Amino acid sequence: MIIGIDASHANKAQRTGVEEYCFRIIQEFKKNIPSHVKVVLYSPVELLPELAVVPNNWEVKILHWPLKKLWSQFRLAFELWKNPPDVYFSTGQLLPFFSPKNSVVTVHDSAFEAHPSAYRFFGRQYLKWMNRLIIKKAKIILTSTEFNKQEMLKFYSYHSTCHSDRVQRAEEFLINKIKIIPLAFDNQKYNLQAPTMENTYGEYILSIGRLEEKKNTKRIVEAFNILKKQLPNLKLILVGNSGAGFEEVQAAIEQSDYKKDIICPGFMSSQQLVSILKQAKVFVFPSLYEGFGIPVLEALAVGTPVVVSDIPALKEIGGQAVEYADPLSPQQIAFKIYTLMSDVSLREQKITLGVELTKQYTWSKTAEKTWNILSDVLL
């Protein structure tokens, strides 16, 4: 049995949620895929040192391509046609037009459908085409939450007011294709015993993610403005690179009376993130749209209380361990943050619930469930 895996998304030195998932899955596969199974990793460039170390039954194929884009649709597609694996696994929501019939693809979200303004026109059209291709050609579709599954059904089942048998059969076909496997976080780094560096910021609240419209960064700044009236020594740290709609975020910061207390350090290493997350008074994650939310688990695991937006995916993973706020209301976001900072009993309760909750999320579980599906595809 030969399994081919697209390693291009995992091959990033600075990884956000999707890239982290791709990286961790491959690393865990090295531990649990049997030695009689051959695994082939595909990449357009040389792999990072951590990824490049593989078991004897693994092979790395560097498929060079002169352009920055379309590697998967041309160079990878040609390789899959010329030397087809028994099962092809794409971790990054991409499927070459020419791909093996036994293809398994992870779909992380449908944000470009729900929030089209956060994407450029041609990028959005490509993502729509790609999701339709995945739904048509993939044998199995993996996703991380029930919410993601329902979004795919909503956007791609071609619901009809006449409820014809054909439409119903199409929806049933898609339902049977989609399997839910939750993501996880690095519990070796993010835990109560994680070391911290010197706190040079004082008392602060923290948000991690791109500074953009979809992450609702502007309203985080507005909520901070409200909090400062009661907590004059508080600071806000926004960790992440700029994204779509950053201009509005930047304007909100510049117009704030407290802009000197708003810190944007950019992208941070995992060691820095653990330390700054563990020392935060509250972690705030009021996204307008999420397919999962790895930073929420990371915050809970280090014992930092969390405020998240009242949206389906975050409800699925946060349960009773987090405080929920209307993402469109800076006043409610501010109130929930203040409550977690001032109510000691509630704060301790949420910390205890959060640490316990995160014990069920491990990359080894995610990889094991994924491997079980890959190995069943040929049955």
Image (cartoon, rainbow, N blue to C red):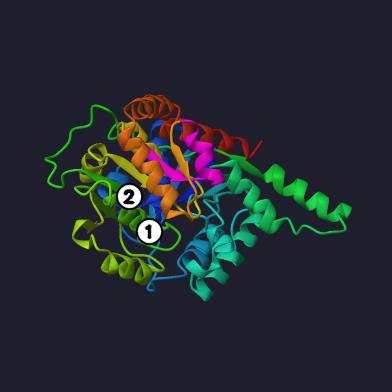
> In the image, is 125 to the left or to the right of 26?
right
Q: Which amino acid type is shown beneath numbered disc 1?
A: Thr
**Residue 240's spot in the image, x, y percent?**
30, 56
Q: Which amino acid type is shown beneath numbered disc 2?
A: Ser
- For the residues labelled 2 and 1, say whether their Cβ atoms are less than 8 Å apart: yes
Label 2: how many Cα within 10 Å (few below 14, some 14–19, many 20+)? many
Residue drawn at the location 51% of the way across and 69% of the way down: 117
* Residue that mark 2 sits on: 207
Alpha-carbon span between mark 2 and mark 1: 8 Å
Would you identify the image quadrant in which residue 335 lies? Answer: top left
* Total numbered circles: 2
**Helix, strand or loop at disc 2?**
strand
Residue drawn at the location 26% of the way across and 69% of the way down: 254
**Residue 339's spot in the image, x, y percent?**
37, 37
Residue drawn at the location 53% of the way across and 47% of the way down: 311
Would you identify the image quadrant in which residue 212 lies? Answer: bottom left
* Residue that mark 1 sits on: 217
Quadrant in which the N terminus appears: top right
Nearest to the observer: residue 344 or residue 241: 344
Q: Is residue 38 above or below residue 245?
A: above
Nearest to the observer: residue 240 or residue 181: 240
Label 1: how many Cα within 10 Å (few below 14, some 14–19, many 20+)? many
**Helix, strand or loop at disc 1?**
helix
**Residue 217's spot in the image, x, y percent?**
37, 58
> In the image, is 27 to the left or to the right of 253?
right
Residue range of the region highlighted in magenta in the rendering: 304-320
**Which numbered disc, 2 or 1, marks the residue that appears first in the sequence?**
2
Asked if residue 285 shows in the view, the reply is: no
Nearest to the observer: residue 288 or residue 202: 202
**Residue 202's spot in the image, x, y percent?**
16, 44
